[in-house]
Image (spheres, coloured by chain):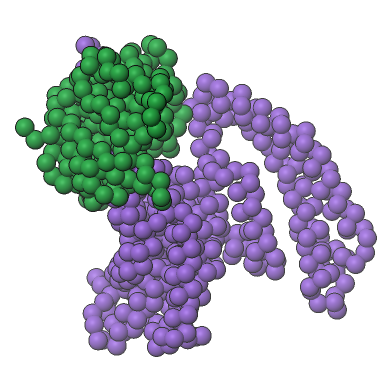
Amino acid sequence: MTPAIELVEVRKSFGATPIIRGVSLTIEAGTRQALIGPNGAGKSTLFNLITGKYPVTTGRIRLKGEDVTDLTPYEINRRGLARSFQVTNIFTRMSVFENIRCAALWAAGYRYSFWHRVSAARAVNERAETVLEQLNLTARRDVPAGVLSYAEQRALEIGITIAGGADVVLLDEPTSGMSRSETEHVVGLIRQVTAGKTLLMVEHDMSVVFDLADRIAVLVYGEIIAHDTPERIRASAAVQEAYLGVPQGVA
Amino acid sequence: MSTATTRPLAVAGVERAARARRYGLWVAGALVLLALPQVVRTGTGIAIMNQMGIAVVFALSFNMLLGQGGMLSFGHAVYFGLGGFIAAHVLNLAGRGTIWMPVPLLPLIGGLGGLAFAVLFGSFSTRRAGTVFAMISLGVAELMAASSLIFDRFFGGEEGITTNRSKAPLLLGIEFTRDRQVYYLIAFWLLVAAVAMYAFSRTPVGRMANAVRDNPERAEFVGYSEHRVRFVSFCASGFFAGIAGGLFAVNYEILTAENMGLNASGAVLLMTYIGGIGYFVGPIIGAVVFTFLQSMLSDYTGMWLLYLGVLFLATVLFVPMGLAGVLMLHTPAWRARKLGRLVGPYLVAGVLAFVAAVGVIGLLEMTHFVVAADSTRATKRLFWLTVAPRTITPWLAFAALVAAGALGLSWAAPRAAAAFGEASRP
């Protein structure tokens, strides 16, 4: 089966500083995987490379077998990859409903149309209502997204990501800054909306990671030091060393 | 389960009611446009209304950029002016019998002209938003100002291009010899353009224009190129600006380089902002108020630009949501049927503000008289009075009005605000 995402020797430098130092990683289709690692390891940078926000310095990136290394974010999105952001990234002055609806327009085939009325786009409107229900945001349907509470905005962030029905979903710290109960709700939501899809998520909350992930990739200083099942990662000495900072002896 | 089935129905019902209300508003607008010439019958009245109609189309097209697309243009008159020039040339060709083009279709020619140049300049200027876009728009405006001197045959140099609408072939036998006939033509195109621009805001690309305005990065991650979305809005905006330019050509039968200059671009920015960029009706209100003040004030005072500038400053500083925004703030009070309670406090504050304004205007006008006006006269007509600005008495009197008004306002304004807050609570 074609992998959902395939990175081949991907490197990224900002100026002279190498951030991603030769990452090769294969995410099998239909799995839920987590990308973990200490702060500054390059997790968000890796997301930005996969989604086309930054160009790679060297290396190739394939999405469902197709080379997407040199494509723009919108071209990659149209090929069925959607992402969320670590810092909430929504359409603040538009209503919650409009946020979701806009995210569903391209996938429904409306492109840059100025000859359709959005109110008559039934499939898109029904999709938006369904997503709102999944997010528990139906009661906030017509509120400007900018006035939502933090947890609601995080939920909307996920909603915008999945509204277009992409089959490869990247979530960047979906539960950051959330209370225990809010986290539990979001984990349930993620499980529900990524059923049958490929999920790659950056997450610091280890209970979320071990709860959701089929496999875990560990990124340390721009290199993948381990990529395995949760049990093996938990037991790995190299991972514990990277997290606990046990000195290696030889530099 | 029951909520899941009844709620979409309720939403659909609300949307149906909203749609009916919108259609009602458009029909009411059309009726007002039809009835206005029966109410305002003077020649100047009709002339000002024609000017207003053109300004409304222009301002609405500008707000497609600023309000809906988040693009601040300092050169939108370029598309207005070029549309106008092209329409004027086509009208001249039609007058000579070279081509067939009746006057009623001429605004469409202006629109296509505006569209063509919007495609040309928009292709590169919409690559970036924000400051870069604003600077490029300024550059394009300067470019056209320079071109108007170079391409003398097209722009007609200092005198501009004159034309004559009575020489064009007739469509359905309709003549356009009088301003009143032109009024109906402007009213027709105003309605068509306003409905089309409103409809545009409710299409997929119109909605994505809002999304790109709010967050261009996120728009790219839901499948849309921010550049392409801005470009489509820009072209549509240029098209409608060109229609306004075409109406201008029909109405005034002359176009000069000034019509596409920085002053014209500045004026449309002022009127749109004063009206309120966050609402569809904002530019309509702004264009009407601005044109009214412009044509009224310029009859009475040489300082009318100063007053318009003060109005703009006051809008930016105190009510950035514009006149339309101030009206919309009162919808909760209206829904709660408490609008009546505001009449008293507003009236008191309004009278006091008027007193203060009379004082300020008096002082400004006397200063202008002393500094700028001819020195052979000792007196000046001001409001309903004849004053002698070179004596101390009127200065003291107007200063007293300012002080009294300001003092009164410091007492009345908080009360009006409190009454507003009280009435807005459901």
Tell which of A14 and B252 is nearer to you.
A14
Q: Is residue B349 above or below residue A129?
A: below
Tell which of A74 and B13 is nearer to you.
A74
| Rendered shade, chain A | green
Q: Is residue B236 above or below residue A91?
A: below
The answer to whether residue B360 is left or right of residue A50 is right
The answer to whether residue A67 is left or right of residue A45 is left
* Residue under the point 68% across and 62% down: B306
Q: Quadrant of residue B88?
A: bottom left
Tell which of B302 and B45 is nearer to you.
B302
Quadrant where the N terminus of chain B is found in the figure: top left
| Rendered shade, chain B | purple
Tell which of B24 and A184 is nearer to you.
A184
Q: Position of residue B331 (x, y in %)?
A: 50, 32
Q: Quadrant of residue B253?
A: bottom left
Q: Position of residue B42 (x, y in %)?
A: 53, 65
Q: Position of residue B7 (x, y in %)?
A: 27, 19
Q: Residue at the right extreme?
A: B392
* Residue under the point 59% across and 25% down: B423
The answer to whether residue B87 is left or right of residue B253 is left
* Residue under the point 64% across and 67% down: B298
Regarding residue B46, the answer to whether it shows in the image is no
Regarding residue B304, the answer to whether it shows in the image is yes
Q: Position of residue B60 (x, y in %)?
A: 42, 55
